[in-house]
Amino acid sequence: MATARAVRLTVNGAPYEGHVEPRTTLVDFLRGELGLTGTHVGCEHGVCGACTILLGGQAVRSCLMLAVQADGADLMTVEGLSPEGQLHPIQEAFMEAHGLQCGFCTPGFLMSVYELLEHNQNPSDEEIRQSLGGQICRCTGYQAILGSVRLAAGKLQRARTAGEAR
Amino acid sequence: MKPPPFDYVDPSTVGEAVSLLKQHEGEAKILAGGQSLMPLLNMRLARPGLLIDLNKVAELTYIREADGGLAIGAMTRERAVERSALVESHQPLLHWATRFIGHPQIRNRGTIGGSLAHADPAAEYPAIAVALDAELRAVGCDGDRTIKASDFFVTYLTSALEPTEVLTEIRLPALAERSGWSFMEVARRQGDFALAGVALTLTLESGGECSAARIVLFGVGPTPIRARQTEQVLIGEKPGEKLLEQAGQKAGEEIDEPLSDIHASAEYRRHLAQVLTRRALAEAVTRVGEAD
């Protein structure tokens, strides 16, 4: 039973398959087996948030899940935010508002922000802090990240309005 | 920082899980939300031979009314508790306290049963369970039994569950009429484990005297601590400012040997217990009758 098991799942809309020992964490599976290295490994005990991905639309720590638990799951990672060569409005906002420097924490932030803005289109500063309090950044001092989230909310709001106007 | 090798099974029923626990007694460990166990595995502080994953046991996820109170399945995610209109109306103390558990990403996976079974004395749910006089249902090979929350937490990270038992449900009785509640904790950063906290309920007679109180301190000892002497200060009296001062004082004194560690000294924990108890009592008084 410690032998490799097949894991079949959907990531960013595409089907993937791998074979791993039960002890392989989901983040190591995504990076090592599937080559999706956008998700980063930080503390490996759930406190830094660098490994955050979306499982069925919910932000989770992929370092605290086993790959075998994701069999049959529908995941979204940072690679799924936009097609190759383009940026999602949230990514644009982070770029414009200097929400990243080294970028190591950024994929985790982006996935948490994505979940936040899916459920709350106009979050208050307090709501943004509550949602992102579990993501650690060493570079920015966080203020620029708050600004990026506000900017992203505005961009998504405008895109929605433009879409409705058509 | 990678888990040691282990075998893994993901049963679909409680019965299967219990059989597996019995079959592999001593070697098996239940995996629920993983937000406490996975860090232990990643740091190799735990080395179970077999992991029994409950995430496919659908029968353990529910929130429903039961005998005027609530019954919550052990695998119910903390985030579901947080978002439940039923919990908000029936158990506002549980609902409010849930937001203090870690961060949303933790609550998306963490489960109420997992939190209780893990029995971290600085966690929110164990204290809430004691404050609300909850009953916990455990299923083993010989059948099921009900364990009162006050008997459930034995010491650090140790519950009254037998190694071959699965926690399946928590039952929370309805608050009595003319009751108020409060929950407060102090942590260095939002989402950290509490340095100290209090969860309490109290009931006032129509004349204003306190007829019942359950005051639970957490983060200050090896389990949630029922501050019985502090409760006695209140019973039969009208909760005015001076009385609440006395109650707070008693709460600070009542803790046997407050935990002293790198996060806070025993002295500071006593002080926090005192201040938080006084403030929480005042808040609970303002809430009396809100839920009626």
Image (tube, rainbow, N blue to C red):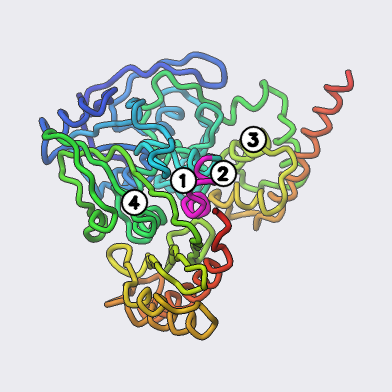
- Labels 3 and 1 in the same subunit: yes
- Separation of residues labelled 3 and 1 (CA atoms): 20 Å
Mark drawn on residue B134:
4
Secondary element at tag 1: loop
Residue beneath disc 1: A42
Examine the rendered structure and indicate whether residue B45 appears above or below residue B156. above
Examine the rendered structure and indicate whether residue B218 appears above or below residue A74. below
Q: Nearer the viewer, residue B104 or B184?
A: B184
Circle 4: residue type: Ala
Front label number (3 vs 1): 3
Residue beneath disc 3: A114
Q: Quadrant of residue A73?
A: top left
> Is B102 situated left or right of B265 in this image?
right
Residue sitting at 42 percent across and 43 percent down?
A: B68
Percent across and percent down for residue A9 are: 44, 18
Instruction: Tell me, yes or no, whether the two marked residues, 1 and 2, touch with CB atoms within 8 Å.
Output: yes
- Separation of residues labelled 3 and 4 (CA atoms): 37 Å
- Labels 3 and 4 in the same subunit: no
Chain letter behind tag 4 = B
Choose the circle earlier in sequence order: 3 or 1. Answer: 1
